[in-house]
């Protein structure tokens, strides 16, 4: 009852703020400490369901056909396949030891899961619900992404301070590029020319040229009144038009909006405490952030760089995915 009252108060307080009308979208939020997924109607800012899930849920994504939610149940060493319509568990997929983040392949046929305890990435064939292959990488892998052309699978190694390059044609790791300290997340630009890496302890976002697999530059962060040691870049997402990168800055309790062309921060937006990850609406007008120590989700209007809604989630929001 207390959580429901909090959700109502937060939503009503936010409703008076002017912002672009929300699309009919649904948010799914993985709650790391609550062992649950919070389901939110983005248009009304209302929590519509809470699903109990496996232990220490972190990475979360949507199947290509939109029917299922895939969820890293890190403590259970599996990826859970959940029916979106009912919230019921459909299958437990083998994912190696301690999967933290994963990425759906471009064709939607494979899930690539980073396994922290195995120092490996596991490819899960979704048609057979079995392991297709596994590749050893550096220590403490976490962030993972596939290049737009399908050639590369890139996985971060937090302990080794590198990103590992796997050639998917040969299923072999062929290179490792040094980054700032503890790379947590990776995103390819839509044209596939650059890889953006969130180096959490390094406090920077590193840009890597894909053709050469060499660093190009790094982007630092500075917010008046916020100590530098709190600048802990975690999640990165690009808007659909590719013009803006939105970066979650961890204990800085802000997100940064970066102009991709100039590589300059155009705005900082204060959100909840310990913002881990984020997702962006299909129309590119809003960002949704998972605030791990506030137990909330913030809705940010990207045009005005303002929070226009705050919604109570479960305990320890970690990841989000948005679905139509």
Image (cartoon, grey):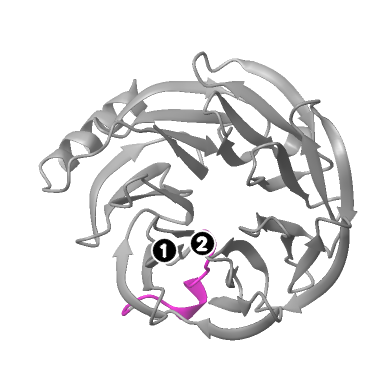
Picture quadrant where residue 172 is located? bottom right
Residue 279, percent from left and from top:
44, 49
Residue 189, percent from left and from top:
53, 65
- Tell whether position 196 is magenta: no
Element assignment for label 2: loop
What is the span of residues highlighted in magenta in the rendered image? Answer: 224-235
Q: Is residue 252 above or below residue 319?
A: below
Picture quadrant where residue 77 is located? top right
Residue 240, percent from left and from top:
40, 55
- Binning the other alpha carbons within 10 Å of mark 2 as few (below 14), some (14 to 19) or many (20 upward) gives some
- Binning the other alpha carbons within 10 Å of mark 1 as few (below 14), some (14 to 19) or many (20 upward) gives some
Q: Residue at x 83, y 73 (%)?
A: 175
- Tell whether position 228 is magenta: yes
Q: Are marks 2 and 1 in contact (CB under 8 Å)?
A: yes
Which of the labelled discs sits on residue 208, or is there none? none
Quadrant (top left, top right, bottom left, bottom right) of the C terminus: top left
Q: Is residue 245 above or below residue 206?
A: above
Residue that badge 1 annotates: 242
Task: Tell me, yes or no, if residue 22 can be seen here.
Answer: yes
Residue that badge 2 annotates: 190
Q: Residue at x 72, y 39 (%)?
A: 110
Which residue is more in the foreground, 143 or 168? 168
User: Main SS of the magenta segment?
Assistant: loop
């Amino acid at each position: 009852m207390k959580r429901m009252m909090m959700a109502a108060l937060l939503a009503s307080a936010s409703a008076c703020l002017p912002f672009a009308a929300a699309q009919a979208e649904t948010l799914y939020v993985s709650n790391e400490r609550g062992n649950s997924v919070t389901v939110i109607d983005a248009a009304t800012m209302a929590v519509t369901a809470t699903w109990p899930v496996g232990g220490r849920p972190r990475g979360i994504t949507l199947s290509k056909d939109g029917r299922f939610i895939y969820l890293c149940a890190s403590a259970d060493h599996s990826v859970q396949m959940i029916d979106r319509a009912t919230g019921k568990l459909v299958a437990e997929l083998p994912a190696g030891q301690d999967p933290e983040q994963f990425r759906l392949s471009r064709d939607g046929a494979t899930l690539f899961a980073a396994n922290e305890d195995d120092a490996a990435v596991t490819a899960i064939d979704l048609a057979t619900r079995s392991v297709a292959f596994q590749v050893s990488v550096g220590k403490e892998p976490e962030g993972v992404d596939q290049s737009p052309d399908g050639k590369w699978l890139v996985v971060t190694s937090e302990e080794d301070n590198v990103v590992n390059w796997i050639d998917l044609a040969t299923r072999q790791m062929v290179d490792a590029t040094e980054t700032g300290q503890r790379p947590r997340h990776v995103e390819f630009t839509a044209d596939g020319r650059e890889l953006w890496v969130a180096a959490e302890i390094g406090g920077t976002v590193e840009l890597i040229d894909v053709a050469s697999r060499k660093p190009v530059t790094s982007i630092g962060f500075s917010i008046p009144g916020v100590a530098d040691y709190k600048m802990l870049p975690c999640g990165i997402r690009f808007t659909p038009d590719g013009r803006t990168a939105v970066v979650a800055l961890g204990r800085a309790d802000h997100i940064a909006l970066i102009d991709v062309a100039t590589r300059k921060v155009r705005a900082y937006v204060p959100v909840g405490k310990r913002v881990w990850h984020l997702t962006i609406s299909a129309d590119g007008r809003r960002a949704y952030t998972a605030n791990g120590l506030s137990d909330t989700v913030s809705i940010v209007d990207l045009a005005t760089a303002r929070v226009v809604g705050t919604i109570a989630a479960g305990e320890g929001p970690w990841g989000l995915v948005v679905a139509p």
